[in-house]
Image: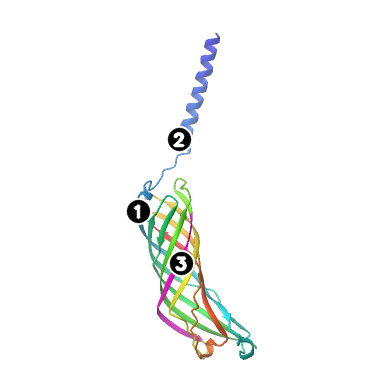
Amino acid sequence: MFSLHRAKIVGLLALLLAVQEVSAQGIGYRRRHLEFYDDKPIHYGILFAVPFTRFNIKHNEDFVPKDSAFVIESPTNAAFRMGFVVNAFLNDRFDLRTTPSVSLYERHVKYRYPGGTDLIEKRESTWIEVPLLLKYKSVRRVNSRMYMLAGVTFGVETNVKRNRGGGTGRLDTKSNDFSIDYGVGYEQFFEFFKFAPELRFSHGIANVFQPSKNSAGMGIGKLTTHTVTLYLNFE
C-alpha cells in the first residue's frame, strides 16, 4: 500500500511538471525576428528626422552701451532631415555608426526693441552633416533593446537664403559647423527590418557668427547652434 501511494504521488508531480512546461512554452513563446542580425558586420538603412534648432547667443561687450535693443534671442524652429544609416558591428556591446544626411534649417535671430518693435533676421539654409558616433547596446530581449550613442558631427552649408523681417541688416554666419552629439534610442526588430526611434542632442562648439558692419550683427559676440532631433531609423 505504501509503495502504491508513493507511486501515485510521483506520478502526480510528474504530470504537474509536464503541464507547467507545456503552458510556459505555449503562452510565453515569442518569435525572434532577424535572429542572426548581429552576425553581419555592416548594416545599412535610411532615416527621417525632425530637428528643433536655434542659435545660442552670447552678447559682445558693446551690447548695453551701444545697442538700443533690450533683447536679442533665437526662437526654436522645426526643420526636416533625411539621410542614410551605416552601422558597423564592433562587438556585442559597441557599434560604430554614421548617419550622413541633408538638413533643411530655418534659424531666426529676433530683436526686441523698446516700444514693442520686433525685427527678425531669418537664415534658411541646406546643410550636409556627417556624424561619427559610438553606439552602446543593451542585451537584446527577444525583439527589442535600448541603446545610447555619442560622438561628433561635421556640417557644411551648401545653400542659403536670407530673409529680413523688417530689418535693414543681414545676419552673416559661417558655412561650416562642428558639434558634440549624444542621445538614446530604442530598437524594435520586425520580420524584415529593424525600426529604431531615437532622440539626439547636438551642441555646436564652433562660433558660426561672421563679424560684419551690418546692423544685424550689432550686439552679438558669438553664435553656436543647438539642436534636438527626433529620428526614425529603418535598417
Residue 154 within the segment the image draws in magenta: yes
Tag 1, which secondary structure?
loop
- All told, the count of numbered labels is 3
On the image, which quarter does residue 45 sit in?
Answer: bottom left
Q: Is residue 191 above or below residue 12?
A: below
- Asked whether, in this view, residue 3 is left or right of residue 97, the answer is right
Which residue appears farthest toward the top when viewing the image? 1
Q: Amino acid at mark 1?
A: Pro
Measure how far apart labels 3 and 2 are at the Cα level: 46 Å
Q: Is residue 122 above or below residue 146?
A: below
The residue that disc 1 covers is 41
Tag 3, which secondary structure?
strand
Q: Verify CB contact (< 8 Å) between mark 3 and mark 2.
A: no
Q: Amino acid at mark 3?
A: Val
Q: Specify which label sits upstream in the sequence, 1 or 2.
A: 2
- Asked whether, in this view, residue 43 is left or right of residue 215, the answer is left
Q: Is residue 126 visible?
A: yes
Q: Verify CB contact (< 8 Å) between mark 3 and mark 1.
A: no
Give residue 226's mark. none
Residue 206 location in percent, x, y?
49, 75
Q: Main SS type for the magenta part?
A: strand
The answer to which of 5 and 35 lies nearer the viewer is 35
Q: Which residues are magenta?
A: 147-164
Q: Amino acid at mark 2?
A: Gln
Residue 173 within the segment the image draws in magenta: no
The residue positioned 54% from the left and 13% from the top of the image is 5
The answer to which of 62 and 3 lies nearer the viewer is 62
Q: Nearer the viewer, mark 1 or mark 2?
A: 1
The residue that disc 3 covers is 152
Q: Is residue 73 visible?
A: no
